[in-house]
Image (cartoon, grey):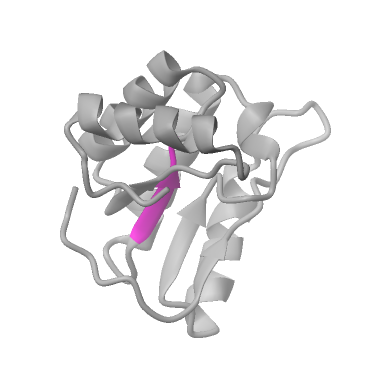
Amino acid sequence: MKNVELKGIITPILTPMNEDESVNLDELCTQIDRLIDGGVHGIFCFGTNGEGYILDENEKIQVLEATIDHVKGRVPVYAGSGCISTRDTIRMSKKAQELGADHPKLCCGISERAVRSLCRSCETCGHSDCSV
């Protein structure tokens, strides 16, 4: 991942959905512009809002691609790459890097076991600098 200074307001964005439960990419881009125009210092896909757990892998990739493309380097993009399983977390962290996200982020509860498992995921993935 890129060496990005953690600073300022890094906003966990909502993933807007259409009535048919598909991702609303137009609204996602509108939301990104509104936040950047408002002065945020980073965009955080699949932060702590919960929708990352209901989207399938293709939908997550779609959101990350659209976000990274639309942000165009104006602010760093943080990719919530934590999944239910360690294997999926590693795969999504690698995919986030491949797509050009500035930093993967792994969010978890307070369980020491969960933290240790996620830290091993980072080491296995090659990103010992992941933020847990």
- Occupied quadrant, residue 59: top right
Q: Which residues are magenta?
A: 77-81
Determine whether 50 is above or below 124 in the image. Answer: below
Task: Please say whether residue 49 is one of the residues in the magenta stretch.
Answer: no
Residue 2 spot, x, y in % from top left: 17, 55
Front in this rendered view, residue 48 or 77:
48
Residue 67 spot, x, y in % from top left: 43, 50
Residue 25 spot, x, y in % from top left: 57, 44
Residue 4 spot, x, y in % from top left: 23, 65
Q: Residue furthest front?
A: 112
Task: Using residue 94 as the reference point, say whether residue 80 is left or right of it.
Answer: right
Count all numbered tags in the image, as a single digit: 0
Q: Residue furthest right?
A: 19
Front in this rendered view, residue 48 or 31:
48
- Occupied quadrant, residue 71: bottom left
Task: Using residue 3 as the reference point, say whether residue 55 is left or right of it.
Answer: right
Task: Using residue 1 as the reference point, say whether residue 8 is left or right of it.
Answer: right
Task: Using residue 75 as the reference point, say whether residue 62 is left or right of it.
Answer: right
Q: Residue at x 48, y 85 (%)?
A: 39
Q: Residue at x 39, y 54 (%)?
A: 78
Q: Residue at x 41, y 76 (%)?
A: 41
